[in-house]
């Protein structure tokens, strides 16, 4: 499949020739705001309103634009917020650990800074691992959790962990070609292609030409190392808030197809068993970005779960 995509690359738009895109020019579902959390510059969106708050936390190598099908819909009934994690999107690019525990502390402090004492926390992939850490480290911030194709339940041997960390050097993301970016989006990340995915491909290619993308490449490498080094595993039993797990049946990234194998359902059911007050929804045909591939089913599950 990847070879076929590469052979057909000449049929696709060539975005590299459009020149660099700066982080502040990335598309977002609502006007972007900024706030300082200590020395960190955090970019975020906030629908406002009187509804109970829902906070969205994106995954690895992405940004708040990945929640385009959730923000408008759920803002009809809730105050919705989403942030760009440091190192990603329009936020600053600090020299920081970028591990799930570190990001959990950042999310908790950012919530306080923007006046959200407690919220439903929705996290995708790495973001799911982060919001679980928020619930464990800052339980006063988490009302409920929604885990969209969450990482954190899968564990790796010491040898596999070392290989993954050695492979994902701090310059690795900068080495990806336009063809590799497209192949990754089309064969691994999304099962449903649309204009939004095409926009994200263009943004990723052009952002890679910005000098500031070096900071994102560092964040990606450190994030991967942090995810491997800090699995939630048995600690998930201490998550005391109601939790909704949503996975797609055709997820091509969880479990890791190279090192783990098996089925997504196996990982999803493990997470469901570990978290005491949890429910599991499997969405037929959806992939790793389950909230994008099946937005109606995902949003309906969230709306039913969140008061």
Image (tube, grey):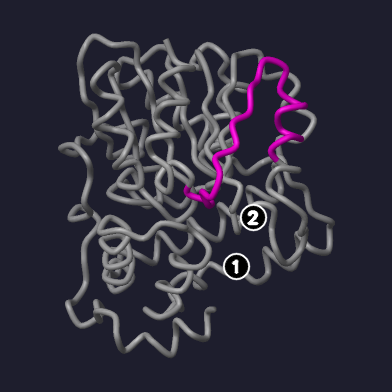
- The mark nearer the N terminus, 1 or 2, is 1
- Write down the quadrant of residue 147 in the picture: top right
- Camera-side residue of 274 and 46: 274
Few, some or many residues within 10 Å of mark 1 (<14, 14–19, 20+): some
In magenta, the rendered stretch is 268-289
Q: Secondary structure at mark 2?
A: helix
Q: Quadrant of the C terminus?
A: top left
Residue positioned 34% across, 11% down in the render: 52
In space, the residues marked 1 and 2 are separated at their CA atoms by 8 Å
Reading the image, the residue beneath label 1 is 168
User: Could you tell me if the residues under marks 1 and 2 are in contact, i.e. CB atoms within 8 Å?
Assistant: yes
Residue positioned 27% across, 29% down in the render: 73
Relative to 49, is 142 on the left or the right? right
Residue positioned 21% across, 61% down in the render: 22
Q: Is residue 274 magenta?
A: yes
Few, some or many residues within 10 Å of mark 2 (<14, 14–19, 20+): many
Q: Quadrant of the N terminus?
A: bottom right
- Camera-side residue of 190 and 116: 190
Q: List x then y, in percent, for residue 99.
A: 58, 44
Q: Secondary structure at mark 1?
A: loop
The circle drawn on residue 225 is: 2
Placement of 130 over or under 108, stated as above or below: below
Q: List x then y, in percent, for residue 165.
A: 67, 63
Q: Is residue 302 magenta?
A: no
Placement of 51 over or under 40, stated as above or below: above
Relative to 260, is 189 on the left or the right? left
Q: List x then y, in percent, for residue 71.
A: 28, 33
Residue positioned 23% across, 36% down in the render: 34
Placement of 93 over or under 274, stated as above or below: below
The circle drawn on residue 248 is: none
Q: List x then y, in percent, for residue 188.
A: 53, 63
């Amino acid at each position: 499949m990847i070879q076929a995509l590469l052979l057909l690359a000449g049929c696709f738009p060539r975005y590299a020739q459009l020149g660099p895109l700066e982080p502040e020019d990335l598309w977002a579902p609502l006007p972007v705001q900024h706030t300082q959390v200590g020395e960190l510059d955090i970019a975020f969106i906030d629908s406002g309103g009187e509804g109970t708050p829902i906070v969205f936390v994106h995954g690895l190598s992405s940004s708040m634009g990945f929640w385009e099908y959730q923000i408008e819909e759920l803002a009809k009934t809730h105050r919705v917020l989403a942030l760009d994690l440091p190192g990603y999107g329009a936020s600053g690019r600090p020299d920081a650990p970028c591990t799930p525990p570190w990001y959990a502390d950042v999310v908790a402090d950012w919530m306080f800074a923007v006046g959200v004492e407690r919220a439903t926390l929705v996290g995708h992939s790495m973001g799911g691992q982060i919001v679980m850490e928020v619930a464990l480290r800052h339980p006063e911030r988490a009302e409920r959790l929604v885990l969209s194709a969450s990482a954190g339940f899968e564990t790796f041997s010491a040898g596999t962990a070392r290989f993954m960390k050695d492979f994902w050097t701090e310059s690795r993301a900068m080495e990806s070609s336009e063809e590799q970016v497209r192949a990754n989006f089309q064969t691994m990340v999304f099962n449903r292609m649309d204009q939004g995915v095409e926009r994200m491909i263009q943004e990723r290619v052009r952002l890679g030409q910005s000098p500031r993308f070096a900071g994102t490449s560092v964040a990606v490498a450190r994030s991967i190392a942090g995810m491997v080094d800090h699995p939630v595993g048995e600690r998930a039993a201490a998550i005391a808030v109601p939790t909704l797990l949503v996975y797609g049946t055709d997820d091509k990234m969880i479990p890791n197809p190279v090192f783990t194998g098996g089925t997504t359902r196996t990982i999803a059911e493990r997470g469901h068993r570990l978290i005491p007050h949890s429910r599991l929804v499997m969405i037929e045909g959806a992939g790793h970005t389950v909230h994008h591939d099946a937005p109606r089913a995902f949003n309906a599950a969230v709306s039913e779960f969140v008061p």
